[in-house]
Image (spheres, rainbow, N blue to C red):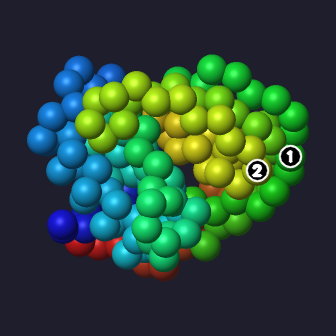
Amino acid sequence: MPTRPIVLYPDPVLLKPTLPVEDVDDDTRQLILDMTETMYAAPGIGLAANQVGATASVCIVDLSAGERSGELKVLVNPVVKAVEGSDVSEEGCLSFPEILLDVERPFRATIEALDENGRPITIEEEGLLARAMLHEIEHLDGKTFLRHISSVKREMVKRRIRKMMKTGDWVAAVDG
């Protein structure tokens, strides 16, 4: 399973909605395997397909970062069906290395999707797993966690990123 380079903000692929997967086929499963290897190598707990330059509506989450088998959640064409509660917590993102932001998100989420075999699944979770799934689904919608902070703080983060780009310090977490 090869790793793929992680796309960094402000690459346009991160800011465009992904496309629904018509058929969960061998190509889709290979993308999922590549994404899993990439996420674990980074290391991270979630990854959306557009973060590796793919346009498919696929994301993965594993709170153990590959440390425990059976923890990987694969979401193909995920749809948020319900959310409830509210929680503010620090988030990072593989497409924003070294940037940590306090983000308010729902505490519970119900997600419907297809698994890696194309079977319908429903996942009802709370806490960090709900947060991670919502973060990755947001990526699939062409949005980033910057939308959850004030415009002043957002401009500060963008200025910091531009400065790191100029100095060559804004480099991919994984460069396949």
Q: Quadrant of residue 70?
A: bottom left
Residue type highlighted by circle 1: Asp
Q: Is residue 50 left or right of residue 176?
A: right
The secondary structure type at the circle numbered 1 is strand
Please give the name of the residue rendered at 58% of the width and 63% of the height, measured from the top-left corner. 63
Q: Which mark is residue 127?
A: 2
The secondary structure type at the circle numbered 2 is helix
x then y, percent, for residue 129: 65, 51
Disc 2 to disc 1, how far (Cα)? 8 Å
Picture quarter with the N terminus = bottom left
Q: Is residue 158 left or right of residue 14?
A: right
x then y, percent, for residue 73: 47, 49
Q: Is residue 18 visible?
A: no
| Relative to 143, residue 49 above or below | below
x then y, percent, for residue 34: 25, 59
Residue type highlighted by circle 2: Gly
Q: Which residue is mark 1?
A: 87
| Relative to 161, residue 59 above or below | above
Residue toward you, 151 or 3: 3
